[in-house]
Image (cartoon, grey):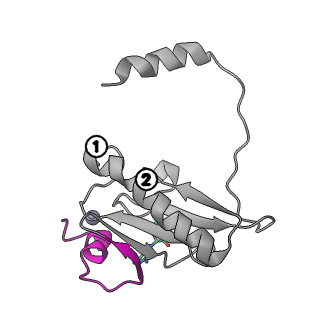
Amino acid sequence: MDNNCIFCKIAAGEIPSSTVYEDGEFRVIMDISPAAKGHCIILPKEHAANIFELSEETAGKIFAVAKKVATAMKEELGCEGINVLQNNGEAAGQTVFHVHMHLIPRYKGDGIQMHWTPQEAYDFAAVASAIAAKIQ
Ligand code: 5GP
Ligand code: ZN
């Protein structure tokens, strides 16, 4: 736990939050500035700033939590879709440097923007094999 980290304190229950789900390793809470009603964030109890620092064990479990909560959200909210979003680094839009995963309820025509302009094609095979060579 990092004593300067607000999400560590929320995950540990030291700061109260509207909790949707909790187990030994995660707490899922309502986002304080939601993109839509029911927007949740999944907080690992282990402090890691981002996906690069997160343990493989926790990384392997977080999507199971996402599935569990997203299923309940869909049933309760009646949303037509859910975005699972996870930002790493300021350049990627991360603002709180304790790794977390967003679950954002979506409806057709809701106006939430999450799109990019496709860039020109490049040498996909070369970049794929360069990245592949770095996988440990
Ligand atoms: P990021 O941009 O880092 O992926 O997302 C951080 C999210 O955490 C934002 O959507 C923001 O609204 C939310 N957030 C920041 N501080 C708090 C807080 O103290 N409590 C809750 N519940 N959400 C927070
Ligand atoms: Zn933390």
Q: Is mark 2 within 8 Å of ligand 1?
A: no
Quarter of the image holding residue 74?
bottom right
Between residue 1 and residue 4, name the one nearer to us: 1
- The reply to whether residue 55 is in sight is no
Say which residue appears at 54% left-offset and 56% top-offset. Answer: 84
Q: Which residue is mark 1?
A: 56
Q: Residue at x 73, y 41 (%)?
A: 117
- For residue 16, side relative to residue 65 (left or right): left
Q: Is residue 98 left or right of residue 82?
A: left
Q: Earlier in the sequence, mark 2 or mark 1?
A: 1
**Closer to the camera: disc 2 or disc 1?**
2
Residue 1 can be seen, yes or no: yes
Within-10-Å neighbours for mark 1: few <14, some 14–19, many 20+? few
- Measured as percent of width and height from the top left, residue 69 is found at 48, 67
The quarter of the image holding the N terminus is bottom left
What kind of residue is marked 2?
A: Phe
Q: State the residue position of label 2.
A: 63
> Which residue is nearer to you in this view: 73 or 103?
73
Residue in view at x 27 percent, y 55 percent: 48
Image position of 115 with respect to 36: above or below = above
Amino acid carrying mark 1 in the image: Glu
The span shown in magenta is 1-22
Q: Which quadrant holds the C terminus?
A: top left
Spatial CA distance of label 2 from label 1 is: 12 Å
Q: Is residue 81 above or below residue 17?
A: above
**SS at circle 2:** helix
Point out residue 64 in the picture as x, y percentages from the top left corner. Answer: 41, 55
Q: Residue at x 53, y 71 (%)?
A: 72
